[in-house]
Amino acid sequence: MLNHSLLETIKTTLQKSKVEKLAAIASEDTFSVKDLIDLSFYHDEQIGFRAAWILENVFAKHQQRFLPYALYFLEKFPQQSNLSALRHYVKILAFMTRKNASMEIKKILAGYDTDHLVEVVFAWLIDEKIPVAVKSHCLNILANLNTRHNWIKEELLQTMDFLVDKESIGFFAKVKQIRKQLSVRG
């Protein structure tokens, strides 16, 4: 069910400070992380983007509030098609899959079958319609999940070779960073 007070709050343009305030008050009393996830799929893409932006801030600054909905987030992740919201989704997953993620997040991911996430992220990586900022986080996610799926490394290296001339100079810099990360992991 849609949280209408949250919807009204994010119908207008948000500044970073307002996003941070909204992230700080996300709780069962006001609105839940589930409400933010649900609103990130709203038919008005600006509202979806704002909800995803707040969601990213909840994850980054108030992770304890995100944790009860982490599995819900992972289930909804592949369905995100709003490119503006997707940027925040892939950034959250990149943080979730990092080596230095919290123990709670690591436990959640350890018990989760990430195969479908990997397939979806690879598909986004090679999709010409996906913005480079999203692809950059996709590279991080795949490199981070390489420790769970040993086949990713070779596939990712080949994909990066294919994409490096088609994308921006910023993407090229990210590819260098990911190559280094993959070589450290063996």
Image (spheres, rainbow, N blue to C red):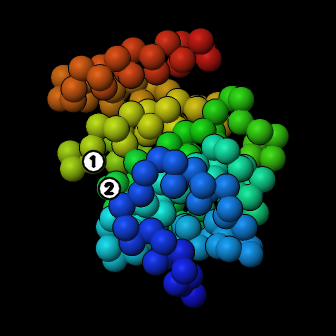
Q: Amino acid at mark 1?
A: Ile
Mark 2 touching mark 1, by CB under 8 A? yes
Give the residue at mark 2.
83
User: Between marks 2 and 1, how big is the CA–CA gap?
Assistant: 7 Å
Q: Position of 68 compared to 32: left or right?
A: right
Give the residue at mark 1.
130
Residue 162 makes an appearance in the image: no
Q: For the image shown, how many numbered marks are present on the structure?
A: 2
Q: Position of 65 compared to 140: left or right?
A: right
Q: Amino acid at mark 2?
A: Leu
Question: Which residue: 74% across, 75% down?
Answer: 29
Q: Position of 24 compared to 171: left or right?
A: right
Question: Which residue: 39% across, 22% down?
Answer: 174
Q: Which mark is residue 50?
A: none
Q: Is residue 133 above or below residue 59?
A: above
Residue 35 makes an appearance in the image: yes
In the image, farthest residue toward the left: 166
Question: Residue 164, image x and y in percent?
Answer: 25, 23
In the image, farthest residue toward the bottom: 1
Question: Which residue: 40% across, 48% down?
Answer: 87
Question: Residue 146, image x and y in percent?
Answer: 58, 32
Disc 2 is placed on an element classified as helix
